[in-house]
Image: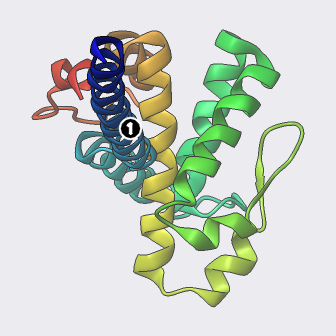
Amino acid sequence: MISRAGCRIRTRSARHSDEKSIANKSLAEESRRRAHFQMSRATPLMRNFARRLIDYEAGENKSSGTQTPSAFRGCEKLRLQLATFMGNSGFHTLLARSLVLSTAEVPWLRAVRLKADGPLEGLEELQAQLEGDEFFEGGVVLLAQLLGLLAAFIGANLTVRLVREVWPKVSLNNLDFDEVGKT
């Protein structure tokens, strides 16, 4: 009898342990889901950073004969700079990941294709189909994701230095890059 009672106690204890384990797994899954959602969204800091670069680029190249729309020209300028730093395939991988992350916020970016040598394809067609603000916001999100990934991999200070090489006149005042690693 004592052993049966002992078994019952162990069974209850094991059941309680299983319930705790299930609860912990649920919490862990919820935490991963939230982290994934947060990681897939461009941070407000990176959005602001990207918006400044795109606004500057649009003002600088009003008469430019480039085919790349100004909302996405920043990615192209960074490609030219970063290809020397990480190679074409490294930049291609970084931009491809940025594009995937961006589609969580801007679904129409799924129609954009990334050419093997780096440039984006399909933007002109999308620009004709979308409202100007919607198209602009897609460029902001993509560039913000690119900058965010770059900052995550090489750090905020080096990211800012690389950006300054491409856009030396852009004001980066009021951007708190110390917060990049903390989110």
The residue sitting at 41% across, 22% down in the picture is 151
Q: To which quarter of the image does residue 2 belong? A: top left
Secondary structure beneath dot 1 equals helix
The residue sitting at 30% across, 48% down in the picture is 52
**Residue 11, horizontal then vertical, whole percent:** 36, 27
Q: Is residue 82 above or below residue 98?
A: above
Badge 1 amino acid: Ile
Q: To which quarter of the image does residue 96 belong? A: top right
Q: Is residue 166 left or right of residue 14?
A: right
Colour mapping: rainbow
For the C terminus, the quadrant is top left
Q: Tell which residue pokes out farthest to the front in this image.
A: 1
The residue sitting at 70% across, 27% down in the picture is 91
Q: Is residue 82 left or right of residue 15?
A: right
Number of marks present in the image shown: 1
Q: To which quarter of the image does residue 77 belong? A: top right
**Residue 84, horizontal then vertical, whole percent:** 70, 13
The residue sitting at 62% across, 78% down in the picture is 127
Q: Which residue is mark 1?
A: 22
**Residue 45, horizontal then vertical, whole percent:** 24, 40
Q: Tell which residue pokes out farthest to the right in this image.
A: 116
Q: Nearer the viewer, residue 122 or 154?
A: 154
Q: Nearer the viewer, residue 19 or 2?
A: 2
Q: Is residue 117 left or right of residue 74?
A: right
